[in-house]
Amino acid sequence: MENTLFMKEGFDPNELEERFVHQVYDVIASEFSSTRHSPWPSVMKFIEAQPPDSLGADIGCGNGKYLTAVSSKYYTGMKTNKPLSNVQNKNLVGTNFIPIAAMERSPNLAEIVYKRGFDVVIGDILRIPYCSERFDFFLCIAVIHHLSTLTRRIEAVNELACILRVGGQGLIQVWAKEQHGVSKFEPTYYVNCKIKAVHGVNNSSDSLSQVIEAVPGAYFPLHINGTEF
């Protein structure tokens, strides 16, 4: 069921996502890319667990940091002090290199990926431009939470499932609203110790419940810096 708190009749998710997701990422592409350079260990572990003859896809590849990480690992493995035979080269490539296709929604981020030497297609996760049952695995990292409705998120997962071969694997990661520490009882990382008044900001319940109309029919809480989402 959709969250009726945030939408009314006539709400256009396409308009909302175009204005507040797609256009924003195109504007901040360069700055965003400069802060996205370290691959997440859990994602690399997933990639490295794939068989060497696998074909993967990174759906919503951003600046291509996982393409870079896989490529760097391959070329590092290729370094040697003496020439290798054809058989050794073949074994080395098979062991280290896993090809990954790249798709990105933002043209400006896709351009960054292309300038890094990778092939990339511009596409929408709701209409993934790949054949069905084409890939052995896919990555979809920090993408689906940008879709504004539950229905669209389910559609995205269905699209991702369609590109997998029988027996394939997918890794989907989304941003958690709550970012707790070791214990679930600890405050989230968004808040220092506990929610408390921030100098110059009224953190009363009335203030925290304010909403803005992002696009006609779509209302969202106004987040105050230093408080939980």
Image (cartoon, rainbow, N blue to C red):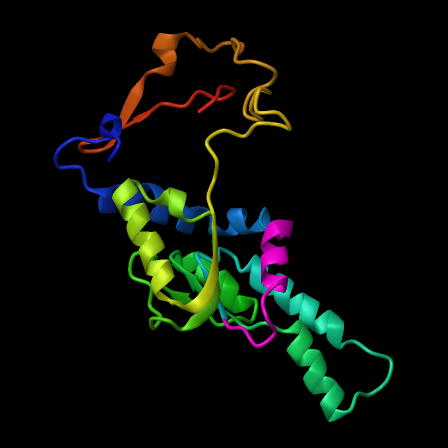
Above/below status of 189 relative to 136: above
Magenta stretch in the rendered image: 38-55
Above/below status of 3 relative to 92: above
Quadrant (top left/top right/bottom left/bottom right) for the C terminus: top left
Q: Between residues 47 and 83, which one lies in front from this camera angle?
A: 47
Q: Where is residue 114 in the image (x, y as percent from the top left)?
A: 50, 68
Q: Position of residue 162 (x, y in %)?
A: 34, 64
Asked whether residue 38 is in view, the answer is no
Q: Position of residue 68 (x, y in %)?
A: 61, 63
In magenta stretch: residue 215: no
Q: Between residues 50 and 32, which one lies in front from this camera angle?
A: 50
Residue at left offset 26%, top offset 31%:
3
Above/below status of 212 relative to 170: above
Residue at left offset 24%, top offset 35%:
2
Q: Position of residue 40 (x, y in %)?
A: 61, 50
Residue at left offset 35%, top offset 48%:
23
